Amino acid sequence: MWVVCDFSSGPVVLLWKGNQIRGNMSGKPVLHYANIRGRMEPIRWLLAAAGVEFEERILKTKDDLQKLRTDGFLLFQQVPMVEIDGMKLVQTRAILNYIAGKYNLYGKDLKERALIDMYVEGLADLNELILHHEFKPANEMEKDLANILDKATNRYLPVFEKVLKDHGHDFLVGNKLSKADVHLLENILWLEELKPDVLAKFPLLQSFKARMSNMPNIKKFLQPGSPKKPIVQEKDVPAVLAIFS
Amino acid sequence: MSGKPRLTYVNGRGRMESIRWLLSAAGVEFEEIFLETREQLLKLCQDGSLLFHQLPLVEIDGMKLVQCRAILSYIAGKYNLYGKDLKERALIDMYVEGISDLMQLILVFPFSPPAAKEENLATIAEKATERYFPVFEKVLKQHGQDFLVGNRFSWADVQLMEAILAVEEKVPSVLSGFPQLQAFKTKMSNMPTIKKFLQPGSPRKPPPDEHYVATVKKIFKLN
C-alpha cells in the first residue's frame, strides 16, 4: 500500500510493508555503509561541504549487508549506496560526481571539470592506500605507512603545493570551491593523523588547510558530534571485516 | 601539429584501450606515441608532462590530461556521450564504474603468476555472469531500448561493448545466458564508428601477449 503525505517540504511517499515504514521520511540523502570512513567518507565530506544534511543507515553485521542485497537495493551488490533524489546510487565516483554537479562543486565548464577530475583521481589513488591502512595486519602497518607517506610527500602533495603556488588562488580550480579542494583537505587531515608534521615542507598546503578548515560548513563538520568518522579502533576491525567478508 | 588528440602509452591495451574505444566511437581520429623504454617514461616525468608521473597521457585541446577517468569524462562530455542531464550522467557513471571494476580484473590478469591464472580466469567468468552482465541484461530488458541510458548512445554503451568483447576473448560462451546483451553486441558492432574500429588496421590493440607484459614490467619497474 502506498500513502502520499504532504509534508511542508514537499510530498513524501511512504511505503508500508507489514507494519514497517520504509523509505525516506525527510527528503534528505540516506547513506548506507559501515560505521567507518572507508569508501563513504569522501561522500560525507562532500555533502557536508555543500551544507547538505543527511541520514545514515549503519551496517553492523553481514546480515545487514545481505538484506540490502536481497531487497535489490544494491546495483552491483556493493556499498556505498546513497539514496538521493529518488535514486539508489552506488559506486563512489558516480555518487561524488552527482553531488558535485548538483551543488556546483564541479567547475564552470568541461575544461575545469577535467582539471578537477584529474586532481580528484590522483587524490583517490592516495586515498585508496590510506583507507586500507587501518585494516592492515599489525606486522605490515609500519611498511604500509612508510609507503603512504612516501607517495604523499613525493608524488601527490607536491603537485597541489605547485598548483596553489602557480596561480596564487585560494582554491585549486577556477578560483572557486570544488570537490577537488574538499578531497584534498580530507586527505591532508587524515595524513596528519598518521604523521602530524607531514605538511612541514608544504607552506601553501598549510595555509590551504587553515583556510578550508575555517569555512563554515567544513568547520561544522570538523566539530565533535558531526557525521565525520574517526579512525577505526583496533578492537573494532574484526567486526567490520566480517561485514564485507 | 595536426590538432588531433595525442595518446602516449605502451603499444598495447592496458589503461589506454578504453580511451581508444571512446574516441573511436565518437568518430575522433587521434595520434599515438608508444613508449618502449623506461628512459622515455622518466623523460616525460622530468619534463613535467605527467602530473602524477603516470600514464596514460592524452594531449587534447591544449591540456596534458592524465588519469583515465578524467580523460574519459572529458571526451564523453565533449562529444555528447554523457547523457542530457545530471541524473542521466549519474546512471552512466554508475554503469561505467561497475564495468570498470570488471575490466580491472581483465587488466591485471596477464600479470598474475602462472599458478593463479586459472583461479583468476574463473573469477572473471563468475563476476561477469553473476554480478555485472545480469545488471545490463535487466536494464535493456526493462526499457526495451537500444542503448543503456536515455535512449541515446553514450559512454556506458561503449564501455559495455568493450567489456563484452574482452570477456568473450577469455570466456567465449559468456553471453549464452544473455539474449539482450547478444542483441546489444550485434547492434553496437554495426554502428559505423564502432564497425570501423573493429576492422583490421584500426587503432584497436590486440589482446596482451608476453611481449606486452614484459615491456610494461620493464617500463614501470614492476616485479
Image: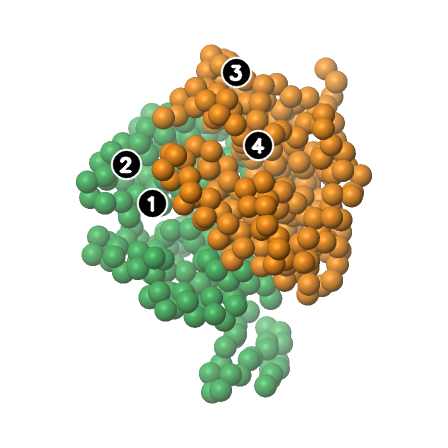
**Residue type marked 1:** His
Q: Position of residue B191 (x, y in %)?
A: 78, 43
Query: Pointers 3 and 2 in contact (CB under 8 A)?
Result: no
Q: Nearer the viewer, residue A151 or B30?
A: B30
Q: Position of residue B167 (x, y in %)?
A: 57, 44
Query: Pointers 2 and 1 in contact (CB under 8 A)?
Result: yes
Mark closer to the observer (4, 3): 4
Q: In the rendered image, which quarter is residue A147 located in? A: top left
Disc 4/disc 2 C-alpha distance (Å) = 33 Å
Q: State the mark number for residue A183.
A: none
Asked if marks 3 and 2 fall on the same chain, the answer is: no
Q: Position of residue B36 (x, y in %)?
A: 52, 16
Q: Colour of chain B?
A: orange
Instruction: Report whether residue B94 is seen.
Output: no
Q: Earlier in the sequence, mark 4 or mark 3?
A: 3
Disc 3/disc 2 C-alpha distance (Å) = 31 Å
Q: State the mark number for residue B36.
A: 3
Q: Nearer the viewer, residue B60 or B138?
A: B138
**Residue type marked 2:** Asp
Callout 3: few (<14), some (14-19), or many (20+) C-alpha neighbours within 10 Å?
Answer: some
**Residue type marked 4:** Pro
Q: Position of residue B10 (x, y in %)?
A: 55, 23
Q: Mark 1: which secondary structure?
A: helix
Q: Residue placed at 57% from the left, 32% from the top? A: B207
Q: Residue placed at 55% from the left, 63% from the top? A: A88
Q: Mark 3: which secondary structure?
A: loop
Residue at mark 2: A144
Q: State the mark number for residue B207.
A: 4
Q: State the mark number for residue A132.
A: 1
Q: Residue placed at 55% from the left, 69% from the top? A: A27
Asked if marks 2 and 1 fall on the same chain, the answer is: yes
